[in-house]
Image: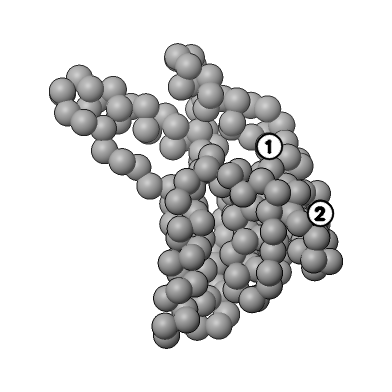
Amino acid sequence: MDNGTSQWASAAVLLGNKEIIPDPPYKLALTYGALTHWFQQRDRGEPWDLSYDDTIFYQAMAFVRALKDGYVEFPFGQAEDYCAARAFGWMDKEEGAARWSSLHGHESDRIEEMECALQELHSGTPITSKDHRVVQAIAMYAKFKHKEVTFLHPHAVNKSWPRFWKFLEAASARRRSL
C-alpha cells in the first residue's frame, strides 16, 4: 500500500500478484472481486459482465438531483468522494485530510490539487489539474453554478469515467428542459 492508497496494490493484483491483503480498502476489494469474477466467467466460457463504479454512480445521481432540485445532497463516505465533497462545500480541506490521509498520495495530492483547482475556477483561469477526480468535481460544480471553465487536461477523466463529458452535457441539457 503506497501512502495508504490501494492504487499500486490494485495494479500489482492485475499484473498477477497473488498476495491477498486481509480486510482490504474499498477499491482494492473491488479489484479482487473483479478479478475473481473475470476468472470465474472465463472458466465457464462466458463473457465478463460489466461492472459499474458505485462512486461514480452516486456522484452522478447527486449531480442530477442537484440540477433538478437546486441543492446538492450526497452521502460521501470514502476518499474518492473528497473532490466532489470539497467542490460543493460539504467539507473543507482540514476535514478531508483528517478523514482520509491517503488523499496526499493519489495521482496528485488531492487536498492541495483541489485547493488549486478551486482557486483557478474562482479566478477564471484554466484548470491545470491532471487528476481525473479533481477535473470531474470542478466540472460538475461549475456546471451546477453556471460558471464557465476551461480545462487544460479534459482527457484526464478517461481514467475512471470515459463518457463523463457526454454525461455532463446530457444532464445539463435535461436541466434546461425541466
Q: Is residue 173 above or below residue 155?
A: below
* Other residues around mark 2 within 10 Å, as few (<14) / some (14–19) / many (≥20): some
Going from the N terminus, do you reach mark 2 or mark 1 first? 1
Question: Disc 2 designates what residue?
Answer: 116
Question: How far across and down, in percent of the image, does residue 12 sit?
Answer: 53, 19
Tell me which residue sits at (48%, 16%) in the image: 15
**Amino acid type shown at disc 1:** Glu
Tell me which residue sits at (64%, 76%) in the image: 146
Judge from the rendering whether residue 25 lies leftward or rightward of residue 147; answer left or right: left
Question: How far across and down, in percent of the image, does residue 94 sit?
Answer: 80, 57
Determine which of the numbered discs, if any, sits on residue 78 in the image. Answer: none
Q: Residue furthest left?
A: 45
Q: Secondary structure at mark 2?
A: helix
Residue 58 showing in the rendered view: no
Tell me which residue sits at (60%, 25%) in the image: 8
Tell me which residue sits at (42%, 83%) in the image: 177
Residue 54 showing in the rendered view: yes
**Amino acid type shown at disc 2:** Cys
Query: Which quadrant would residue 138 be assigned to in this image?
Result: bottom right
Question: Disc 1 designates what residue?
Answer: 107
Quadrant showing the C terminus: bottom left
Question: How far across and down, in percent of the image, does residue 134 sit?
Answer: 66, 52
* Other residues around mark 1 within 10 Å, as few (<14) / some (14–19) / many (≥20): few
Question: How far across and down, in percent of the image, does residue 41 sit?
Answer: 22, 27
Q: Is residue 143 above or below residue 114?
A: below
Q: Is residue 62 above or below residue 37?
A: below
16 or 68, nearer to the observer: 68
User: In this figure, what is the number of numbered marks?
Assistant: 2
